Amino acid sequence: GENVEQHPSTLSVQEGDSAVIKCTYSDSASNYFPWYKQELGKRPQLIIDIRSNVGEKKDQRIAVTLNKTAKHFSLHITETQPEDSAVYFCAASMRSNTGKLIFGQGTTLQVKP
Amino acid sequence: DSGVTQTPKHLITATGQRVTLRCSPRSGDLSVYWYQQSLDQGLQFLIQYYNGEERAKGNILERFSAQQFPDLHSELNLSSLELGDSALYFCASSVVEGKTEAFFGQGTRLTVV
């Protein structure tokens, strides 16, 4: 079936430390993997995405890696700051290529000052 | 501002009633997606439209229906409402199917009492 598993569900780090969130997906035909950040009561906002023809992508303190063979991808945040505290969702596009995104369950990241 | 507009922002209604949620996609976006986010839950895909046609369905209840109009705005109709339907309902849009990022609206918070 169409499924995206995300771990951990909660993550607490000290300011300045790195945070890593991992996701696995079920559909081997998935070709687009975005990450969204959602602050309390607000809309999810895209922070980075990666396509299946790329193994890694970086944008300042944020990076995403993709292992298509293992069907997993990860979000890496370095030098975390309190404003990074939010819920992070991974997602994967499904085989139908309609753009339907299936989301992981979310990770609540808390960055302690 | 993502450019995706959802109305209303808040809606309180009684069990058994019917409501309509509205979404205007970003200018130029042909694809509209609806997601449900219950309290402390992830984003559950409901349904997708592309240029007026239904393209993909998720775990959408039979009491729920949607459509996309010629001007590309979309409406999600929820009927025979139950307490468990209380949630944030998000609309997202993208230019084409599956190949570009999806932008989320600010959501409609539905409370069924």
Image (cartoon, helix red, strand yellow):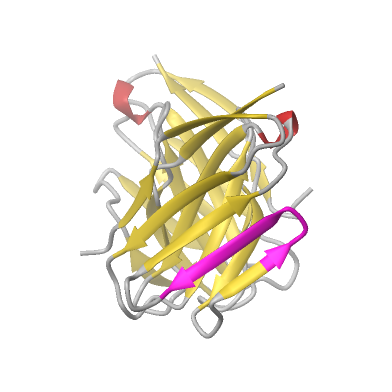
Q: Where is residue A84 shown, x and y percent of the image?
A: 69, 37
> In the figure, B10 relative to A59: above or below?
above
Tag count:
0
The magenta stretch spans residue A61: yes
What residue sits 52% from the left and 48% below the top?
Answer: A20
B43 or A55, nearer to the observer = A55
The magenta stretch spans residue A51: no
Q: Where is residue B34 shown, x and y percent of the image?
A: 47, 53
Residue A82 falls in which quadrant of the image?
A: top right
A113 or B80, nearer to the observer = A113
Q: Main secondary structure of the magenta part?
A: strand
Find the magenta span and give its range: A58-67
B55 or A73, nearer to the observer = A73
What residue sits 59% from the left and 73% below the top?
Answer: A56
What residue sits 40% from the left and 40% below the top?
Answer: A8
What residue sits 36% from the left and 52% below the top?
Answer: B65
In the image: residue B41, left or right of residue A3: right
Q: Where is residue B77 shown, x and y percent of the image?
A: 42, 45
Res B82 seen here = no
Residue A28 falls in which quadrant of the image?
A: bottom left
Q: In which quadrant of the rendered image does the N terminus of chain A lie?
A: bottom left
Residue extending furthest toward the left = A1
Q: In which quadrant of the rendered image does the C terminus of chain A lie?
A: top right
> In the figure, A49 relative to B23: above or below?
below
> In the figure, A92 relative to A16: above or below?
below
Q: Where is residue A48 shown, x and y percent of the image?
A: 65, 61
